[in-house]
Amino acid sequence: MNKLVTLMLIFCISAGCGSNTQKTNEKTNDTGSSRKNEKKNILFFGNSLTAGYGLEDPSAQSFPSLIQNKIDSMGLPYRAINAGSSGETTAGGKSRIGWLLKNKIDIFVLELGANDGLRGLPVAQTAQNLQDIVDSVKIKYPEARLMLLGMEVPPNMGNQYTTSFRRIFRDVAGRNNMAFVPFMLDKVAGIPKLNQKDGIHPTAEGTTIVADNVWQELKKLLSK
């Protein structure tokens, strides 16, 4: 009788252990699956051009939002985060970037400099601020993929300034091995029907073209 009770206890303990092991394995598998399906973050860091200034519904019509639509249509596991701030200069971005780096960044898209150019700020200062922003991201998230959106200023700023200003974006992109869009407003700037009354910010139609300009380079990073 005692032997029977002992055998029953052994059987119950063994069964319990097997059940716990199975639950542990299931938990581990669930965690692995969750990590695999977790969306990666794309941070769009810029000024009013990123924020969607003047658009009827920036949350749906800004170029980061339009890119999110493209991402979703392809079933890619990425989340577009719009960190555009109207009026932002590179100096302002430099002081703001630290707060945004609290959340994990997988792809960093930098769109700043236009306001520096319109104010005629020293090109060397703009270039250094851009580099400092990039350095902050690289230090915090060394595995993050980087992208820079180039900008140009109107010719009335003078040939020397416009040429030097254009060059800083290519230099920063090359120095940091960043994906690069030479001029994000290509096929939009200077075309009245694609711009708002201020002649600076794209309309909804113009923003669609901007999104396509950015997407042509960004999609290459998503496949890596």
Image (tube, rainbow, N blue to C red):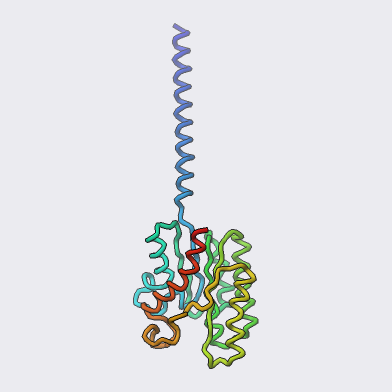
Above or below, 37 against 130 in this view is above
Residue occupying the far top of the picture:
1
Above or below, 162 against 25 in this view is below
Along the line of sight, the residue nearer the viewer: 3 or 175: 175
User: At x 41% / y 73%, what residue is drawn?
Assistant: 62
Along the line of sight, the residue nearer the viewer: 80 or 75: 75
User: At x 45% / y 59%, what residue is drawn?
Assistant: 78
Q: In the rendering, at what x and y percent does residue 116 appear?
A: 56, 83
Quadrant placement of the N terminus: top left
Residue 60 occupies quadrant: bottom left
The image shows a total of numbered marks equal to 0
Residue 205 occupies quadrant: bottom left
User: At x 38% / y 83%, what residue is drawn?
Assistant: 194
Along the line of sight, the residue nearer the viewer: 164 or 104: 164
Residue 53 occupies quadrant: bottom left
Q: In the rendering, at what x and y percent does residue 23 appear?
A: 45, 34
Residue occupying the far left of the picture:
56
User: Is residue 43 toward the left or the right of residue 142 in the image?
Assistant: left
Above or below, 9 against 211 in this view is above
Q: In the rendering, at what x and y percent does residue 161 appear?
A: 60, 88
Q: In the rendering, at what x and y percent does residue 104 appear?
A: 53, 59
